[in-house]
Image (cartoon, grey):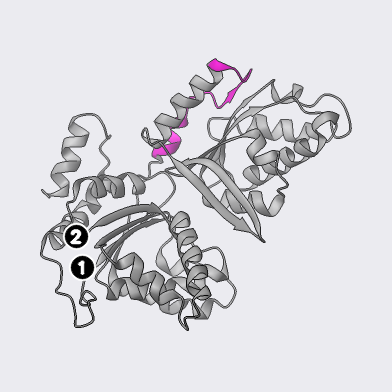
């Protein structure tokens, strides 16, 4: 791979990326890692495992919309790694890990994490994880052992996060048990802050309509265009997770943007905890085909109100297509009076400076 600075310059010169001095400042770390990965992989040990001592990875953190995922994807798409490479969203990765641990436990092994980590490390030298965050004690208790085995297997990890390592799982239950993992990250990864004052995601959405009515083909075309602008044209992948045994699924997710139909999120028996968990995992929600609400879909209407509240409290940007204007979505039946607050919040979230107002 050529210098990552040159690749970035080529992208900015072609107009595919707008130059950002803060982004340019972190580019040498990617060049450093690319050159380390260009070297021959360490020889395998006597038990067939790669020798310990893979190159130090990169922990890239900073505020929302600063271009962390874009830089990681640009790196992943341009580096050639002998030994295999993979890019995956952190939550999707952890879902795979949990499923693998479940399968391993059925075999009666004493340590269910070891075969899962070894299976991931086998045939892999670079792992790019987007949007690392630890929100529950189950993940907190797993990641330390998991990453230790990956590093021992010679895997270099690049990850993005909105928080520095010291703030992961902040105020979490039994956090003292999590502290060795933070120390491990600081030892085996270069912690790099992307401190751009500019929120590129907010810039891309500023001045755009974010509420489309009626929910017709024109609205869908507008939503498609905004999806392309926000995600860089990514196809997206499903985002799935569980909350207290309930399965929550969004059909398309990329670069912090989740896209879902109304019935997928409001037509299923989900509640506040589920929507709050979703809000923790995304930065923008694109919700399509919200119908008129009333007595015939009362339960779905209640869930919609709860979803809007969760998005509002999390200060997320909401992009929506609906059958009518907010004030006319719910005009009859029980709950119509209470919906006035939801309509007001929908209007407030349409303002240009909504997301920035959240700090």
Residue 324 lies in quadrant: top right
Mark 1–mark 2 CB contact (< 8 Å)? yes
Q: Which mark is residue 357?
A: none
**Disc 1 marks which residue?**
55
Q: Give the alpha-carbon distance from disc 1 to disc 2, as whole Å.
A: 7 Å
Image x and y of residue 13, in percent? 18, 32
Among numbered discs 1 and 2, the one appearing first in the sequence: 2
**Disc 2 marks which residue?**
33
Residue interval drawn in magenta: 200-217
Residue 304 in the magenta stretch? The answer is no
Instruction: Work out whether residue 328 can be spotted.
Output: yes
In the depicted structure, whether residue 322 falls above or below residue 129? above
Please report the residue visible at 59 percent of the width from the left and 49 percent of the height from the top.
278
- Helix, strand or loop status at disc 2: helix
Image x and y of residue 107, in percent? 49, 76
Please report the residue visible at 35 percent of the width from the left and 68 percent of the height from the top.
119
Please report the residue visible at 47 percent of the width from the left and 72 percent of the height from the top.
104
Please report the residue visible at 23 percent of the width from the left and 51 percent of the height from the top.
25
**10 Å neighbourhood of mark 1: few (<14), some, or many (≥20)?**
many
Instruction: Work out whether residue 170 can be spotted.
Output: no
Q: On the picture, is 46 further left or further right than 93?
A: left
């Amino acid at each position: 791979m050529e210098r990552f600075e040159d690749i970035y310059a080529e992208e900015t010169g072609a107009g595919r990326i707008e130059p950002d001095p803060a982004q340019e400042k972190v580019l040498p770390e990617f060049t450093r890692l690319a050159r380390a990965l260009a070297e021959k992989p360490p020889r395998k040990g006597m038990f067939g495992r790669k020798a310990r001592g893979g190159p130090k990875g990169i922990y890239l953190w900073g505020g929302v919309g600063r271009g962390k995922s874009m830089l990681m994807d640009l790196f992943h798409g341009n580096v050639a790694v002998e030994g295999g490479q993979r890019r995956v969203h952190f939550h999707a990765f952890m879902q795979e890990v949990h499923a693998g641990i479940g399968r391993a436990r059925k075999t009666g092994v004493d340590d269910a994490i070891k075969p899962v980590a070894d299976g991931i490390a086998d045939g892999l030298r670079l792992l790019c994880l987007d949007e690392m965050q630890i929100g529950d004690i189950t993940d907190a208790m797993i990641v330390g052992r998991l990453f230790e085995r990956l590093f021992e297997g010679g895997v270099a990890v690049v990850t993005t996060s909105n928080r520095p390592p010291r703030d992961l799982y902040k105020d979490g239950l039994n956090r003292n048990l999590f502290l060795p993992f933070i120390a491990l990250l600081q030892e085996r990864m270069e912690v790099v802050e992307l401190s751009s004052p500019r929120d590129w995601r907010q810039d891309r959405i500023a001045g755009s309509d974010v509420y489309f009515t009626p929910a017709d083909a024109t609205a869908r075309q507008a939503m498609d265009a905004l999806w392309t602008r926000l995600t860089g044209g990514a196809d997206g992948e499903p985002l799935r997770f569980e909350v207290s045994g309930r399965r929550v699924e969004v059909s398309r997710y990329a670069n912090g943007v989740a896209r879902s139909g109304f019935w997928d999120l409001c037509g299923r028996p989900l509640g506040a905890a589920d929507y709050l968990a979703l809000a923790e995992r995304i930065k923008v929600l694109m919700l399509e085909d919200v119908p008129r609400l009333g007595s015939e879909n009362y339960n779905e209407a209640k869930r919609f109100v709860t979803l809007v509240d969760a998005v509002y409290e999390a200060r997320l940007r909401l992009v929506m297509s609906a059958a009518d204007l907010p004030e006319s979505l719910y005009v009859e039946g029980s709950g119509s009076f209470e919906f006035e607050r939801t309509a007001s919040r929908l209007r407030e979230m349409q303002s240009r400076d909504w997301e920035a107002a959240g700090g």
